[in-house]
Image: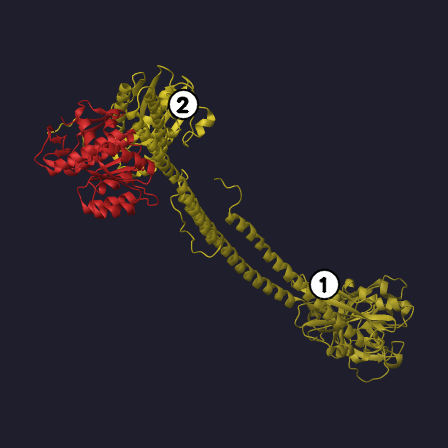
Amino acid sequence: MKTIAIVEDDPQQRAHYAQALREQGYRVQDFADRARALHAFDHALPDLAILDIILGREIGGGFDICRYLQDRDAHLPVIFLTSRGNEIDQIYGLQLGAWDYQTKPVTLAYLLARIASLFRIRDRKHDRAARGAVRTLGKLELDRASMRVCWDGHALELTPTEFDLLHILIGHANGASYDDLARATQQGVVENNTINTHIVHLRKKFKQLDPTFDCIRTKYGYGYHWVCR
Amino acid sequence: MKRRGLSIGARLLLFSSVLLALPWLGYRYIEEMKQFLLQGQEEAQTLAVRAVATVLHDRPEWFDVTESAGDTWLAQNALYAYPIDSSIQIDGYASDWGKVLERKKHYGPESTVYTRSGELAGSVAFDLVLGERGEFIYGFVRVTDAQRVYRHPGYRSLDRSDHLRLAWFGAAGVMRRIVLVTEGPGTVSAYEVEANWRYPTTGEALPVRGEWQERGRGFDVEFRIPAEWLRYPQRFGVSVVDVDDAGERPIEAVVATVPKAWSQDLNRLIVRSPELERIIQGLGRSDARICVVDRYGRVRAVLGGQGTAGDLCADTDRIGQELFQDALDGRQNVLHRHDARTGEHLIVAAHPIYAGDQVMGTVLLEKNSARILDLQRDTLSHAALATFAVLMLVVAGLLSFGAWLAFRIRRLKRAAGAAIDADGRIVQDALHIDRAAGDDLGDLSRGISSLLARLKRYIGFLETVPRTLRHEILNPVNTISMTLQTLSRRAGGETAALVKSAQQATRQLELIVNSLTEAAHIEDALKQDAPAVFDLAELVREYVANSAQLNAGANLVYDGPPAGVYARGSDVRIAQLMDKVKDNALDFARNGSPIRFVLEKNCDWVNLSVRNQGPRVPGHVLEALFAGMAPHRPTTEGRPHLGMGLFIAHRIAEHHGGQLQVTNRQHPSGVDVTLRIPLTTSTPNPSPPSQSPT
């Protein structure tokens, strides 16, 4: 049975997460603050951690826990769950090695799906031989099952959200609308701007591999279009 | 902001102009000083003149105080012996008499005391002038006589030819007589004669010299007699006796300085008194001129004045009445005279001389005020120079101080203005200008700094409110949301519908919070955008086309060039701005009416107008349109409207160095929202949209 650690200072939300996860058959450790969580992690690491960023009086408490966990196990999946929608926080969290970042309110179903998929990806990463169906589009190779992306033969590290966005993009031959793309984030309310930010990050990652990358075109007032077909 | 009053510099200049009164005050002071000095001199002169007068009191012998009926006449017809500067050569010629000759007195028919015919219009007349120099009294007589008759040696009587008679009172009041007679031009003979003027009393030679010269219709006689003879009681008379018949030699006429009625008397001889002069010698000063005049204004003594050019009592027997009239009336007096010849300012003090109760004469003391005036002139020029220099220094100092102050104030004003940007955001929370200055401006600077710091803290607090709010609201919303999700998984039927409705409400709540935080974060978000050059025309054209596709009911029209309008910034942000403006236009557009997106280049700027037809924006709303939290449209289709859209659009426009304007249009009625941003000349990075992957 996989162990999921939840660090959330709000007891009600913590209870909801815990209950939903237990219903899915996970073992759940829930902590209200950083000290207790770290104390427990000293004894045993969970398989996945869901962290709130603001923990009581500690504004960046979630970041600290994430740093601790990544030091102990660089492959440990971490999901930030927070009301802080600030893009800076988002970038900071991902730089620390967090696997995903969800702003509140989250859809429980989506959270559960995301957890399942993270476990699956981790397992696949451990088991390199197991490979799912690979979709190829020009220089792009996309493995849906293991969430692996290659551009021109080089692996690309994408967050689950970015992977989903890319998947939707290449799935729409005439361009994906903001509404289509919003589905990738699986969040209740998604502003176009949030999608814009994700796309900016996505482009950046491609350009780090290939400075001439220009496959994602903006369709102003509509969405984005993967033009390299 | 327009300044309402005078600038500090102008005020300083105005106030410092009061300093211009200083030279005037200095001048006034020097004038007063001059008056004071002049007054001092007047008083000193008055004292001196009183001292002289006191010495001369009760010395009637120096003045003529004979009290008789004819006194006045005699006094008025006195003979005056003018002081003569140069030596006189007794030669019968008048050339050495100089200006004194001009004062000769004419004796004509009215002075005739005898004519043989009995008619007054006689054949003879003469001019007489007397002079006084050293030990002698000099006389010059110019006789007009058509028929000259010289003495004949055959006659013993001295009155058988033209001759001159001199008479005076000797000691003890005895009248003495001298006849000047000659046998021809040349030295005259002088005889002291008896009362009948005929025969000499003694044969001894007299210390009287005379020369006789013929001249046209007459002759001149120049003579001198010892002054000592005439010293007291100073009576002297001159007569000219005319003889025309060389045969019989009778006296034809006698013309005298004393008329017939007073034949037993003699003219008073006025001579400057050596005794007087000796007495006042000790009182004399070289820079002052002392003059003693008798009650008829005749000068009796003059002393000093070598140092002055003043002409008081210089060459006149009668000096100006105004100088001594008051003194004669018994009052001491001070007069100021201006010498027109030398331009000197003279002060004359006068004091009466008494003999008993009677005023005998006047002492005048004249002194020029040249020293005082020189002093005044020097002081004035020094004071003027010094005042001017000081004034210039002070004015220059004040002006430079004022300019320095004004400069510092302007600098502080600029710094304070720069600390807050056009939208009222604090960009600098402390001023560096005059921060260390110890004066009031330093205080002001530090005051503004502290004000800015406090304001910044407050604004910082306000800015964190939306984030805090978001955090605080989203946590309970998350709880509600999850509860509802759990509920919806378990419940069914009617409960499921209720849960769905509740979920709808939480969604809306979330929208509100997102809208708020989007506005709150717009500044930070804009700062993170990497600016790039993009084609605005292409963006708008494509945006309109895509939006038309998405909003099926809407009539969106693009009006502008298809491509080639380049601007610098973030294309996605411009698209975000257009989202806001488009949503706004859609909400207000009349059903089915077109919304036109008009793109125009205007010099270095590009204008993008979004024009809808519909209701206009009321004036009061227009002003607060970009302030945020100013909802001005009806809530439609369950979407919340916090008025944040235009606020965000406005911020994006500003971030691109442009502006957003909302204007009402009349025909057809509607609203134009215009974005105005600068064009850029550079072209975008080569990234043709149609580039296909290789």
Q: Are marks 1 and 2 on the same chain?
A: yes
The crowding category of the residue bearing disc 2, from other C-alpha atoms within 10 Å (few below 14, some 14 to 19, many at least 20), is few
Give me the disc on residue A120: none
The residue labelled by disc 1 is B336
Of residues B456 and A111, the one drawn nearer to the viewer in this rendering: A111
Q: Looking at this view, name the residue that lies furthest to the top.
A: B592
SS state under label 2: loop
Chain of the residue where label 1 is placed in the rendered structure: B
**Which chain is tinted yellow?**
B
The residue labelled by disc 2 is B635
Using the rendered view, name the quadrant where residue B64 is placed. Answer: bottom right
Of residues B260 and B29, the one drawn nearer to the viewer in this rendering: B29
Q: Amino acid at mark 2?
A: Thr
SS state under label 1: strand
Closer to the chain start, of discs 1 and 2, is 1
**Which chain is tinted red?**
A
